[in-house]
Structures are given as C-alpha cells and as structure tokens.
Image: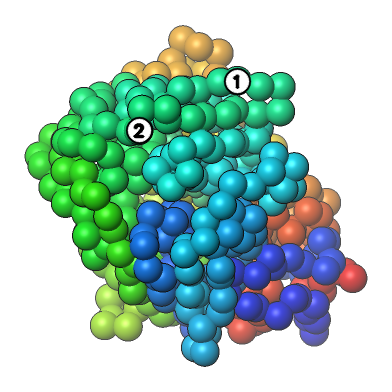
Amino acid sequence: MSSLIQDSARAGASVGLKGDRMTINGGRPLSGRIELKGAKNLVTKAMVAALLGETPSVLRDVPAISDVGVVRGLLEVHGVKVSDGDAEGVLHLDPSNVESANFVDIDAHAGSSRIPILFCGPLLHRLGEAFIPDLGGCRIGDRPIDYHLEVLRNFGAVVEKLPSGIRMSAPNGLHGAKVALPYPSVGATEQVLLTAVRADGITELRGAAIEPEIMDLINILQKMGAIISVDTDRVIRIEGVDALSGYDHRALFDRNEAASWAAAALATNGDIFVGGARQPEMLTFLNVYRKVGGGFEIHDDGIRFFHPGGELNPVIIETDVHPGFMTDWQQPLVVALTKATGVSIVHETVYEQRFGFVDALVEMGATIQVHKECLGGQACRFGQRNFKHSAVISGPSRLHGADIVVPDLRGGFSHLIAALSAEGVSHVSNVGIISRGYENFINKLEQLGADFVLEA
Ligand code: EPZ
C-alpha cells in the first residue's frame, strides 16, 4: 500500500513535499482519471500581468504548485494583495498599492524561479524602477537573459549590473520599439508583451514565440484593455495604451502536464483519462503519440490516453518552438520510447543540455546514447558546439529499479515514470522539485493506483 504526506493544496500557496524521497514499487499500470488545472507557464505570467492593472484581477484554475507560490510571494513583497477566492484554484490579485521592494526580500522570494525577469516591464511602468536577483530555473542549459535585457533597453530602460543582481530604471518612461528576436523565445516574447502594452506608441515584434500560453496571455491583456494583433510570420503588433484595468480569466489547461500523464500511461501499460486536456493545443503531441503506438480518445471534458497492447514503435522527433514538438514533452516520452521496438532518435533543439536525465534511465537498464551531432533532422543552433543534444534510444528495454536523484522538473517526472514502469523497487530522491510544476502529483499517483511510499 502506498502512503502519502503532502501539504494541503491551497491555490498559490508555497506547496512542497514534507518528505523528499519516494520508494516506488514499479510494474503496475497507472489507470484512472486525474484533473488538470491551468498551465504553469501561463498562470505565473498572468499573475505578473495583474501588476499592470489599475483594478483587481481574478485568475481561475490556478494550480497549487510551488512556482505559483514563488510569484505570489514576489507580488506580495511589491505590495500586491493576493488572496484565495472561495472556490478552489481562484486567486484575487489587487495591485492598488504597488511599492518598491528591497533587494533582500526579492532575493528571498525569487527562489529558483526565472519569473522575476518578467516583473521588469510592469514595475518600470508602475514605479520607474525594478530589480532582479540572479535567476534560477531548471538546470537544462545556460538559460541566459540577454534577449530580455536587450528588449528592455529597446523600450528605453537603463540596465545596471550590480554584484547582487540587475537594477533597471526608466528615467524617460518606456516607449514603443521595433524588436526582432534572434530566436522565438517564450520569455522574451512575454517580456515584450508585458512592457509594450503600456509603453508610449507602437511596438512591432518580429520573431515572436506563438505558444498557446502566449496566446492566452494576449487574451488576458486584451481583457485588460490592451491592443495587440498577431500577424503572420511571427509578427506581433502592440499599440500602447495609457491605462489597463484588471481581468477575470480562466487559465488555459496545462498541456505539458497532460503530455506527461499521457507518457506515463504508455510507459506503464496503463490507461489515464486526463480531465481538462484539449486537442487543439496538443495536435503535434497527439500525432507523435499515435505514431509510437499510443491510443487516445478525445472527449469534451478531456483526453483518454492508453496503451492499446502490442509493441510500441520507434520514432524520430525534433523538439522545436510551437507549433513543433515541445521540448517539455520529450523527457517523459523518452521513457516510453525505451519500451519501443527499434531505434528512436530525439534531437533537442530548444535547450542545449536537456538529456542529463537519461543517465538514470541507463542505470535502470535503458539503452540510450547521447551525441553532439544534430541527428535525425535539420542542423540546429547547438550543432558543432560540443553539446550532447541528440539522443538515440534502442529498445525494447526492461527497466529495473534503481536509486535515483531527480535533476529538474520534467526530467524528474520522467524518472518517476521510469520507476513506476520498472520491475522492482526504486528509491527516488529530491522529488520535491516536481511540485514546482505538477499539482498534487502524489495524490494523483495514488488515484492512479501507483504503489509507493513517501518518506517523511
Ligand atoms: C519557457 O522558458 C518555459 N518556462 C519552459 O518550461 C519551456 O521549456 C520554454 O519556455 C520553451 O517552451 C516558463 O514558461 C516559466 P525560452 P523560457 O526563452 O521562456 C534561449 C518547464 O519545464 N534564450 O523560450 O525561459 C534559451 O537559452 C520549463 O516548464 C536566450 O538565449 O524559454 C533557450 O535555448 C523549462 N536568451 C531558448 O532561447 C534569452 O534571453 C528558448 O528559451 C532567453 C532565451
């Protein structure tokens, strides 16, 4: 029997596991129904957008994950009143009294998140200055912020690097700009949106990221009074306005979490109904899932993912920006690919170091090699640069239990799936990191019949 110890799930609260190590008895199919809430990669940005309003905002379907807790803390130190609504997953955000925060408080609340960089545009509008500490986030590559700083300079911000972080000011206000991103960065596109909506004049962004989470952020900003048009060829135009109001918005579902449970169903021979998942935002994932041999059914209230029996097929995938195959989908899927008959190739083109998690899979009996070359697709930014960013997975492998340490959010979830699908017992440490992006994953694993114990 499994047991669990988890903090109560309060929307936006700092949620962490009391125990950080799980003992998993693998080999049981995961089966049952789980419900998704809003996307981590939208909700956290939507919370920042509330800073731009002159009236309070209401955000619905907010997941109880620790990244939301980090943003909540950062908003609170800047004077935003954040409170839970009566219904589960509802947050009220009142920015009437936004104020400067001191460096130490910002640093203490930023934790390991990269979200603080997105506070800059809104804070420059509200207060004329902003400070960001050294940024964290998952260790999956260099993850620089050069695009963000360049974007802010284009709008007229003055950027000063200090030993403790970066200070920004806008002595002459922020004005619309022509911005061209060298790569369709999700965060830098959000930076442009959150800054341009209240800048003086028109902004034209070329090379924008167009992920569904970005489109939902645009929906929110339009509700607040912004004027934003999304043109063809990754061009976004924003006409700055003098004032924005608050919003009331139900967040887009978390398609990364949906893909993770889908991969778990496949890897464990299981059958999982993912409530709240929708087809349009997952089209590319569903195509790959079908090619691998996974079964799915689209319903009005979610998607059922299952292993239909028989052998799984190898595939060749290249991760890419939307509408390509998302980088966040590859780690969980790689576990299922270890069970496919034949050779699969995954070429990671978004982050240069996102295969650290495969070492643990190899220890569990998978046959995976990582290469510096761009395999199976177009040459990418990381070719010829000494980054092991192409993985060759040969299967089928029978995974066996092992002692593993979770390295980052998505890699960590893939380790969980691997342990759940393996024969025998695994000890998985550092599982707390998974609560950065997966709401109540312990409860969900219980609901799906996983056999594990969470150590206190
Ligand atoms: C977002 O990160 C997500 N995080 C990531 O999810 C996701 O993997 C990524 O977008 C791609 O979809 C959040 O939304 C909080 P990027 P972001 O800017 O915005 C380079 C997860 O597990 N780059 O699109 O930080 C960068 O190094 C996380 O949920 C620069 O070179 O990603 C990377 O190679 C992990 N300079 C590429 O662009 C910059 O200034 C794409 O990064 C910014 C980015």
- Asked whether the beta carbons under mark 1 and mark 2 sit within 8 Å of each other, the answer is no
Q: Give the residue displayed 56% in from the left and 20% down from the top.
A: 160
Identify residue type, mark 1: Lys
Residue with the most extreme top position: 384
> Looking at the picture, does residue 396 appear above or below residue 308?
above
Q: Which residue is mark 2?
A: 173
Q: Is residue 408 in view?
A: no
Judged from this view, the residue extending furthest toward the left is 232
Mark 2 lies on a secondary structure that is loop
Q: In this image, 247 relative to 348: left or right?
A: left
Q: Tell me which residue sits at (24%, 65%) in the image.
A: 223
Instruction: Name the mark nearer the viewer: 1 or 2.
Output: 2
87 relative position to 221: left or right: right
What percent of the width, then of the height, locates residue 200?
23, 37
Colouring: rainbow
Estimate how packed mark 2 is, as few (under 14), some (14 to 19) or many (20 or more) residues with alpha carbons within 10 Å: some
- x, y percentage for residue 151? 36, 27
Residue 454 or residue 433, whichever sits in front: 433
Q: Residue at x 83, y 61 (%)?
A: 21
322 with respect to 90 (left or right): left
Q: Amino acid at mark 2?
A: Gly
Q: Residue at x 36, y 62 (%)?
A: 54
Residue for badge 1: 161
Q: Nearer the viewer, residue 231 or 79?
A: 79
- Asked if residue 62 is positioned above or below residue 205 in the image, the reply reads below
